[in-house]
Image (spheres, grey):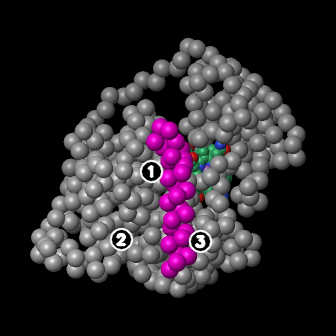
Amino acid sequence: MTLASYSEKYIRFLLSSDSSHWSHSLTRLPRMLSLVIITGLFAFTSGKPCDTEANREPYLSLNKNLLRSLETQEGLPNPSVYLALRLSNYHNLAKESEHLNKLKNYLHNDLQSSLSNSQPVVGLMALYSLALKSSCYDQNTITFTVSEKSETLLTHLKKQMEQEKENIVFSNRPLTNYYQYSLGMLTLCVNGIRVNNHVINKLIKAVEHEGFQHGDSESIDTYAMAGMALQCVKNAGSHVQNAAELNTALSKIKQKILASRRTDGHLGNEFSTGLAVQALLAMGSPVAEYEASMEAMRTSARNNIYHNPMALSQMLPSLQPKSYLAIEHMGCLNESDTLVLEPIDPVVVLTSQTKVTVTVEVVTFSGASAVYSVDVPKESSLLDVLELLKTRYVDFTFKTEPSLWGPYLSVVNGEQARQSDRRYWDLSSDGTQLSQGISDFKIEATQTITIKNISY
Ligand code: B12
């Protein structure tokens, strides 16, 4: 047994709610002394493997990359990026405050128009609230007006959650998805708002029966978000009605996350590992259960896997190591304003001379298929390929919609795969689902990409 796991066990023993354990240990140790030891052991077990000098350098460099992404960001200001910057121990307060203002203007207006059009926005609204909370901003001053009635952000969030729950009652699924449902619940909870028991029970039941899917694999991201939401509810102590069911759901989530560990240490895939580690941290897992996954993320970071700011924003807090639950207790005082961006030399992107052939097969919802082919320089993105195909073939067209992850492929050859119809354009290469979207996926070799309109 390592010293870290030994001390972890010892802490659990000392902190055990069983009073006999306490009296047993405290008869031998004066209370103050034992607290000092507990604090020291925590510092050792939680701090040691993650917060070493060797790990701080790569962390800081990723932190700077995330900060730099604010300068090149297109579209809506990203609340998830802001959240990760706020959860860091190192800050650039001027840039953070500039970004917060953007969120309060542009993101706010976008949410207002979605609400006016009765669109479900629980996920984005939750991220907005978490962003405000992470900067200790008074959310009572943030309001939206619907049908001439002005109500606070958190009141709207509560209402959105009610609508999502009603949809589960009638259609067995949320209006959006369980990832956003969990994010909404987590947000209400970290804001100290008591979450309706029926809302909680729907998530518990979903963990028990539904199985969270993403394409053809399990959605570890969704299990992770559900885990953080339910752990927060458990910590708040308000959900006493079904404490046993809540515990069972939490155990199942933990087991799903741990079972998803790949041989390289990632949990699910590279992009779910950060949230999965956050969930394990929130659930009080011992270091040994997430150490290898942290190392796997550092390796992926070195290989530039997390160049998408959204991906970086979800994994960075876990390396600190912190989870979204930490937002509940942020004091926003005496923050270290030390994150300075050095000027970087402009990067000259060299187009590869090597050409590869990409065949794109489009399969419509009725099953009709069309095949297009083009030669592109190696390392081109799938988006580059689609743009090129558009100029080469008159019958090939496509449209994208902006999202926090970048352009989302929504229409191909005039056919829309609407989320409201539970359909999407699925991307796969030689039979394997892509783990990135059209702007991030790079063509490394000659291959066939299938774009298929499927229902989920
Ligand atoms: C739910 C979900 C889906 C659902 C979305 C519809 C629904 N049911 O609501 C479906 C199943 C359609 C889907 C599809 C895809 N997804 Co998805 N999805 C998610 C998930 C679990 C939650 C997204 C969410 O609701 N966020 C909350 C709201 C507030 O944020 P949002 O940005 O506004 O959300 C919208 C977009 O994220 C968009 N979306 C969903 N997935 C993707 C993927 C990409 C690349 C883009 C640009 C947009 C996008 O749909 C969301 C709802 O409207 C995330 C997990 C995560 N860690 O974020 C993965 C995730 C974002 N998806 C991922 C991937 C890879 C895909 C696909 C490319 C898979 C594929 N091979 O086809 C496709 C997208 C293809 C396309 N047409 O462009 C990856 C992205 C990794 C990366 N580096 O790019 C993630 C992180 C999962 C993972 N760990 O691998 N997804």
Mark 2 → mark 1, Cα distance in angstroms = 19 Å
The residue that label 1 is drawn on is 274
- Residue sitting at 40 percent across and 50 percent down? 290
Q: Residue 427 location in percent, x, y?
A: 69, 40
Q: Amino acid at mark 1?
A: Gly
Q: Amino acid at mark 3?
A: Leu
Classify mark 1: helix, strand or loop.
helix
> What label sits on residue 328 in the rendered view?
2
User: Counting residues from the N terminus, which is met first, the one under dot 3 or under dot 1?
Assistant: 3
Q: Are marks 2 and 1 in contact (CB under 8 Å)?
A: no
The residue that label 3 is drawn on is 203
Local packing at callout 1 (Cα closer than 10 Å; few below 14, some 14-19, many 20+) is many
Q: Are marks 3 and 1 in contact (CB under 8 Å)?
A: no
Along the line of sight, the residue nearer the viewer: 316 or 104 = 316
Q: Amino acid at mark 2?
A: Glu
Quarter of the rendering containing residue 203: bottom right
Quarter of the rendering containing residue 140: bottom left
Along the line of sight, the residue nearer the viewer: 135 or 429 = 429
| Residue 248 magenta-highlighted | yes
In front of the other: label 2 or label 1?
A: 1
Q: Start and end of the magenta stretch?
A: 243-271
Compared across the picture, whether 182 is left or right of 48 comes to right
Q: Residue 114 location in percent, x, y?
A: 61, 67
- Residue sitting at 50 percent across and 60 percent down? 254
Cβ(mark 1) to ligand 1 < 8 Å? no
Measured along the vertical axis of the image, is residue 364 above or below residue 116? above
Along the line of sight, the residue nearer the viewer: 172 or 260 = 260
Local packing at callout 3 (Cα closer than 10 Å; few below 14, some 14-19, many 20+) is many
Mark 3 → mark 1, Cα distance in angstroms = 21 Å
